[in-house]
Image: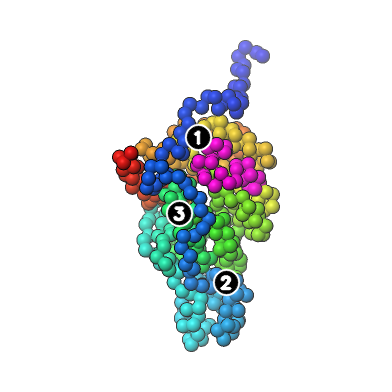
Amino acid sequence: MKQHETKPAKRLSLAELKAKAKRQVLPTDQPPEGATSPDAKPIITFNERRKGKAPSHLADLDMAGRKELLTAYGLPAFRADQISRHYFGRQVVDPAQMPDLPAQMHEKISETFFPTLITDVRSLKADKGRTIKTVWELFDQTRVESVLMGYPGRATLCVSSQAGCGMACPFCATGQMGLTRNLSTGEIIEQVRAAITTVAEGGLGEENQRLTNIVFMGMGEPLVNYRAVVQALHRICDPVPEGFGMSARNITVSTVGLVPSIYKLAEEGLPVTLAVSLHAPDDELRDDLIPVNSRWKVKELLDAAYHYYEVTKRRVSIEYALIKDMNDHVWRAQLLADELNRRGSGWAHVNPIPLNPTPESIWTASTPAAQRAFVEKLRECGITTTIRDTRGSDIDGACGQLATEVNRNQAAARRANVRHVQ
Ligand code: SF4
């Protein structure tokens, strides 16, 4: 080697990187977000607390079901096509606004197909009007939310699939509420219809006139409410008059890791994007961070995600919230890259998500240097990585997967009380 040439930097092994890590904050170092007692433990549940069923709606049924229902009421089956075109093609729910329907049918059609499923109780705007968060009240007074986000050339809706959530992630206030109930297909689709209308009416400003993307990242774990969510995916993607006719490529279903349901989803013939909320590549940490990991481990989850990619040819998104000194170590970036590369190349895309700085909490932002080092390590290992935009954090949280931001101040106050009681 000539004198002026510098030696290439030695690539450290995983063990060496691990030995260099300075600090390890654990999810158990603090009671879960929104916990009412200091020793609260996350309890996973798949069971709904409330069994009430939303009134039946046009969007709950496929075309055959709509025709059947009309026939059962003594109405001509061909009206199903007309009514569906008004609903999915024009987002109209008032039969009086459907000119091809005889007036004497309006009342029956209205009560059969279009009960009010969601009512806007509060809408908040942020990001100069490019983000709108809406709180919806359902027929049984439960509340869920959806978030609309406008970007240059696209408008994305984040929908809720459950009221509450049974996955008990300790960083998420929704998770501590437990699962109230699954939403019906109609309740999910009505969030979509409302968003299409809002965007078309210029609610996100002039440059966004069409809803282009939908992410199932609101309240709830979509794959727990599997049947209603898959039906909703059909209504979203099937062409008018069956559904809204949106591109499956622009729809993302997010999961914390219900492995059997990922295999099932791969067989549905709906090439939607799968997003895995991973947040840790090692079981030791993930068992505490995402409690469902105690049932399905990281390797099983990544195997299922890879299978999903192989069947659908849709690149999987790996969501990774960078949490200071908890999961943002370079060795974890290396381990994540190793786990992804071991299964194949180019099949997954990692989205590190920066948290807001919250000094009083363990759920706080990684330092910019740690974020950079984490991303650089992934890229050095050939993993495509894009830092995700977190919209709407100034209006009580973005999408529910990281609802930590929700009620942050109240949570801090509760923690203060918890410590006080101790
Ligand atoms: S992060 Fe998502 S899956 Fe976990 S508790 Fe919250 S809403 Fe449920």
* Disc 3 + disc 1, Cβ < 8 Å: no
Q: How many marks?
A: 3
Q: Of the residues under marks 3 and 2, which one precedes in the sequence?
A: 2
Q: Position of residue 408 (x, y in %)?
A: 36, 46
Residue 129 badge: none
Q: Which residues are magenta?
A: 280-306
Question: In the image, what residue occupies the spot 53% across and 83% down?
Answer: 100
Question: In the image, what residue occupies the spot 41% across and 62% down?
Answer: 142
Q: Which residue is mark 1?
A: 328
Q: Position of residue 156 (x, y in %)?
A: 50, 56
* Separation (CA) of disc 3 from disc 1: 28 Å
Question: In the image, what residue occupies the spot 43% across and 68% down?
Answer: 139
* Separation (CA) of disc 3 from disc 2: 28 Å
Q: Dot 1: few (<14), some (14–19), or many (≥20) neighbours within 10 Å?
A: many
Residue 178 badge: 3
What's under tag 1, amino acid-wise? Answer: Asp
Q: Position of residue 148 (x, y in %)?
A: 45, 57
Q: Of the residues under marks 3 and 1, which one precedes in the sequence?
A: 3
